[in-house]
Amino acid sequence: MCFFEQTNMRIPRLIWGYAAVCGGLALGLASCDDSRSFTDSRNALLSFSTDTVQFDTVISTVGSSTRQLVVYNRNGDGLRIASVRLGRGGETPFRVNVDGSYLEPESGARAYDFEVFGGDSIRVFAEVTLPENGQDAPVAMDDELVFTLESGVEQRVVLAAVGQDAYMWRGKVIAADTLLQAGRPIVVYDSISVAQGVTLSMGPGVELYFHDGANLWVHGRVVAEGTKEQPVVFRGDRTDRMFDYLPYDNTPSRWGGIRLKASSTDNRFSYVDIHSASYGIACDSSATDVAKLTLENSILHNIGGEGLGLYHCRAYVANTQISNTLGHCVAVVGGWAEFVHCTLAQFYPWDADRGDALYLANQWLALDYPLEHAHFLNCLVTGYADDVVMGNLKDENHDVDYRFDHCVLRTVESDDAARFVNVVYEKPDEDGTGRGQFALFDTDNFLYDFRLDSVSIARDKGALEWALDEPLDRCGVSRTGDAAPDAGCYEYVPGE
């Protein structure tokens, strides 16, 4: 009993003594923690990750992706931000969240009382939805994010965006002959369908922005006629960036593609730019005595499937670049096809299990499709692999007519002199072949220019006979001004 009485008397003294020691330590530690002290000196300022939060071109009435701003306090003491506001207040098209606080338009797009400890930072997230501006051309719009410090100093960051009005098509059916002219782009949701017997025509400068999964289904006919300066553009509708260095427009499979159905004939595409699709142009089977597709002076690039699929139909392709596809750049399965001065370049960067630059077949899904005519004249066919010309051809069917005349091919040498006429074979790692023969090959930023470099072995390898059918290259350069035309769709120009 005496033992417990003595202990009970000692416990409070021990606890209070321990608490006093801990309290003293805590006060000492707090007094040494400079990050918890604040200054109102007008010389102490915030720093920002950027002085302008720049949005890419935004389709009017469609919300942007989110951009981020980091606000740093690089001072030893903390800083108190009395308020953060948008310069245009509740009239602004920008939406901003500062360190978890939304700048409500109803309250003047302003928030109060933020603390940033010394050496710390806070994050700001911004979005924008721009109103229609009533113009075909893009219109710039900006605002300011104003930080007012406890010291009274104001610091500003610019918010900037460019708005583009567009026509919105949802599940559009072209039921009568229609002509599209340059102006606002058309944003396509749920695909476009061209009815049988109907022609959809497109003039220079027309732009179609397809939403994810949207396609152009052609039961009738499409005539898309751009110019070198104003091509007709088929692309995805993402105008923002995946990363700072990488626009979504430089990535594949942003939309579906163009499919020419069995009933569709006499389609003509000239100076068109088809990119970032899941497939390029797919031609369903139809009679080979009627033209299915004429494709000239065009680019099909960066595609998540086949670039051009010709399935037992009739097609003429000239002065055209088909490049960087997950599937084959070009697949010809039966039918009649002629390629003149084309560049087929298989350097798809997103997957090593890519298709071939050129695939020829007269069988598909165990069915025979006579390959009546597959001629390649003054063409350049290259890629990463040692052999990019492949196929499934059964000679015993006696229905195979293919020919390469004055072409540069990255494939195994053939002793078939009737089918391979004056062909130059690329050898792996040989100077002037593969990726090394092109003007720009930036795999870090996914930027490519398939015009020829001075060292390219494709220079002067074409035949004048075939160049006379296409005397100007895809950029309008004459092919008849030097010793011989170059293979592919681009004529080398010194100094470019």
Image: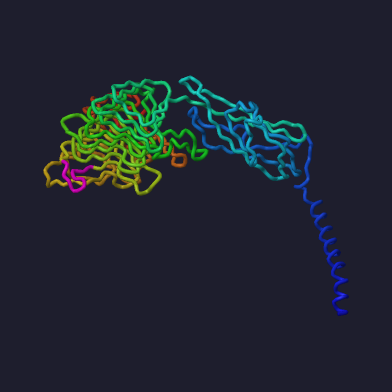
Q: In the picture, which quadrant includes the N terminus? A: bottom right
At x 22% / y 42%, what residue is drawn? 360
- The residue at the far front in this view is 1
Stretch of the chain drawn in magenta: 360-369
Q: Specify whether 226 is left or right of 244.
A: left
The residue closer to the viewer here, 218 or 238, is 218
Residue 472, x across and y down, in percent: 30, 24
- State the predominant SS element of the stretch in magenta: strand
Is 220 part of what is drawn in magenta? no
User: Vertically, is 450 above or below 37?
Assistant: above
The residue closer to the viewer here, 114 or 288, is 114
Residue 473, x across and y down, in percent: 31, 27
Residue 488, x across and y down, in percent: 30, 33
Q: How is the image coloured?
A: rainbow
Q: In the picture, which quadrant includes the C terminus? A: top left
The residue closer to the viewer here, 106 or 47, is 106
At x 82% / y 54%, what residue is drawn? 27
Q: Is residue 437 visible?
A: no
Q: Specify whether 30 is left or right of 119.
A: right
Residue 312, x across and y down, in percent: 20, 38
User: Vertically, is 91 above or below 214?
Assistant: above
At x 42% / y 25%, what residue is drawn? 167
The residue closer to the viewer here, 283 or 111, is 111
Q: Specify whether 320 is left or right of 53.
A: left
Quadrant for residue 172, please give it. Answer: top left
Is 365 part of what is drawn in magenta? yes
Q: Specify whether 140 is left or right of 374.
A: right
Quadrant for residue 475, please give it. Answer: top left
Q: Is residue 146 visible?
A: yes
